[in-house]
Image: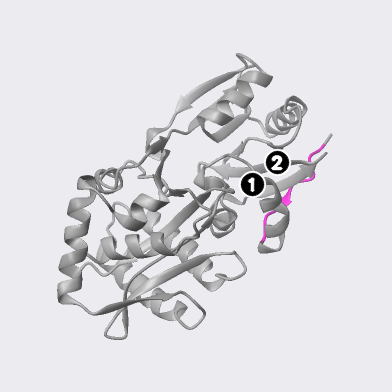
Amino acid sequence: MDIPFKPITINEKELITSYTIPGNYMNCDLSFANICSWQFLYDTEFAVVDDFLLIRFWIEEKKRNAYMIPMGRGDIRPYIDLLEADSLHLGHPLCLLGITSDAKNVLETAMPGKFVYIPERDYSDYIYLREELATLRGKRFQSKRNHINNFNKQYDYRYVPINEKLVPECLELECRWYEANRSDADDEALRDERESMIFALRHFRELGLSGGGICVDNTIVAFSFGSPINHNTFGVHVEKANVNYEGAYAVINKEFASHIPDQYLYINREEDLGLPGLRKAKLSYNPVIILEKSAAIKKH
């Protein structure tokens, strides 16, 4: 059968999250807000077949199709077969991306030995305990507390939730950040990130996002926002700060974690993309899980 794929839009939020939120997958790629705000780059599509959610998208400059693991209850094998038929029809072996260890266990239980797994370390997610990021207790976080204390000595700040009134100020800070950080080497990646971020900020409420900013002298100097990935994991999708305010990143990190509801045990701060500085920063917050993701290629 032909799978009735159609583009994912904001209107599908309730349907898509009815499959992702109750589950145990902690992968940031399954955040509905991420899927929608990056749809421009991947042309992400979905279909629901017999109460299984199927997701297809396009990679390698939209020259190749790939899929997420089917999500639903029951035997996954018929839906893997459907995806394989779809992929072969498009000219490629079946490729599932974002396959975490628990997703791999599902595939191996259903179809043992049928996939080759290729780990992608640069796309591993960094997962933290929400309480640890919110409190920064203990010796492991001493340097973070020092940054925050220094910030507090210099600035009188307040944390303000992101709302429609605050969005233009966040966009203005993002614009300054972009101009300060762009380079020929990574300009395309920054442009893509910027387009995703602008879409998210302009559709903040509809995407189910929440976030906040650090306000100093009536000016936003840092902001962060995110959304739930599943029932116990909250994803932080964006964090930007004016680096002229030393310690601003540490402050917004702690403040936002403090405002995430207690029902979320974990915070997923997403990948480092192989960038050494970003990897060092993410490791410095002592992740409890580095969530390895692999590409799973179906054997013929």
Quadrant for the C terminus in the image? top right
Q: Would you say 89 lies left or right of 123 here? A: right
At 42% from the left and 32% from the top, the residue drawn is: 120
Coloring applied to the structure: one colour
Q: Is residue 244 visible?
A: no
Asked if residue 228 can be seen in this view, the reply is: yes
Q: Position of residue 282 (x, y in %)?
A: 31, 47
Other residues around mark 2 within 10 Å, as few (<14) / some (14–19) / many (≥20): many
Q: In what element is the residue under mark 1?
A: helix
For the residues marked 2 and 1, what is the alpha-carbon distance in whole angstroms? 11 Å
Q: Nearer the viewer, residue 286 or 181?
A: 286
Q: Which mark is residue 7?
A: none
In this rendering, the label closer to the viewer, 2 or 1: 1
- Tell me which label, 2 or 1, sits earlier in the chain: 1
Query: Which residue is labeled 1 in the image?
Result: 20
Q: Is residue 83 above or below residue 152?
A: above
Q: Give the residues drawn in magenta, as a range.
A: 2-9
Residue bearing the label numbered 2: 54
Magenta stretch encompasses residue 170:
no
Q: Residues within 10 Å of mark 1 (few under 14, many from 20)?
A: many
Q: Position of residue 272 (x, y in %)?
A: 35, 45
Seen as rendered, the residue at the extreme bottom is 218
Nearer the observer, 14 or 264:
264
